Image: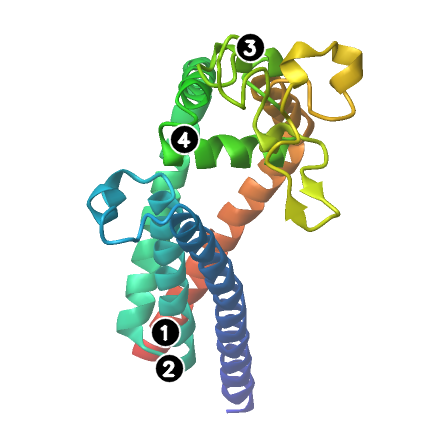
Amino acid sequence: TVAKHLNFDHVTTGIHCAKCLTFTWNTIFSITGLFILSIGIWGLSEKESLESERITYLGSDPMLFFVLVGLVATSISLLGCTGALFESIFLLKLFTGGIMFSLVLEVLSGLVVFSLRQHIKTSLQNFLTVAMLQYQDDLDLQFIMDEIQAGLQCCGVKSYLDWKANLYFNCTSPGVQACGVPASCCVNPLENGTILNSQCGFGTLGMEEFAVQSTIYLGGCVPQLNRWLNSHAGTIGFFAVVLVVIEVGSSWQAAEIACSIAF
């Protein structure tokens, strides 16, 4: 009887630990999902894509991807949290199914990216070229190009001189932007540290390289992205493995809790 009682206490303690871990991890993932969702909503609001006259084109907005990923991650994580908290077999089964489906998609995506990495690199270069050429004509492409250039601290596709191919920034253009680059290329785009100086890149294409290297980024975004990926490949791989382990562990814990409730 004592042995059975000790065994029962051991099982109860294990289930309690599984519930705590499942709740904790899924709370973290819920917060992460909400963060991704907020990025998507922020991007849509920045481009005014949610305005009534633009809502028709919402389905083609690239920021919608962040919204969908954030919603899915948050929804699945909340299923795990509430299922563990209220010991609901139904919610835990839904959570486990969602995790398994996500794992399959992640593995397939990884295989596709690895097998088509050269094609993806070429496609990315072509996309950035199109975004650069249509910079003033498409708000979506303008937003993406500005975020990439500011985030990676780069300018143009292969170098800042690529902006000469843009009709408005070309030195033969009659406009005020002639022989310049966007403000997202500038090393210090903020005037007095607070106000965006939209003209900080004006005239830089007509100057010598040594004269503008302190004003704008000279390197292109494709080489910069390659360097960033190469230098962070180990970190990316590590976090990918950790993510898979956590997802598998959470799914296993949810199944363990469901079995303990059922039996």
Q: Earlier in the sequence, mark 3 or mark 2?
A: 2
Where does the image place residue 246, in percent across and percent down from the top left? 52, 54
Number of the label disc, if any, that sits on residue 141: 4
**Residue reaching furthest left?**
56
Relative vertical location of residue 97 with respect to residue 111 in this rendering, above or below: below
Give coordinates of residue 90: x percent, y percent: 26, 71
Q: Residue at x 19, y 45 (%)?
A: 56
- Tell me which numbered mark, 3 or 4, is placed earlier along the sequence: 4
Q: Is residue 1 left or right of residue 126?
A: right
The image quarter containing residue 210 is top right
Q: Amino acid at mark 3?
A: Cys
The quarter of the picture where residue 142 lies is top left
Q: Whole-Å distance between the Cαs marked 4 and 2?
A: 46 Å
Q: Which residue type carries mark 1?
A: Gly
> Mark 1 vs mark 4: which is more N-terminal?
1
Labels 1 & 2 near each other (Cβ < 8 A): yes
Residue highlighted by disc 1: 83
Disc 1: CA contacts within 10 A as few (<14), some (14-19) or many (>=20): many
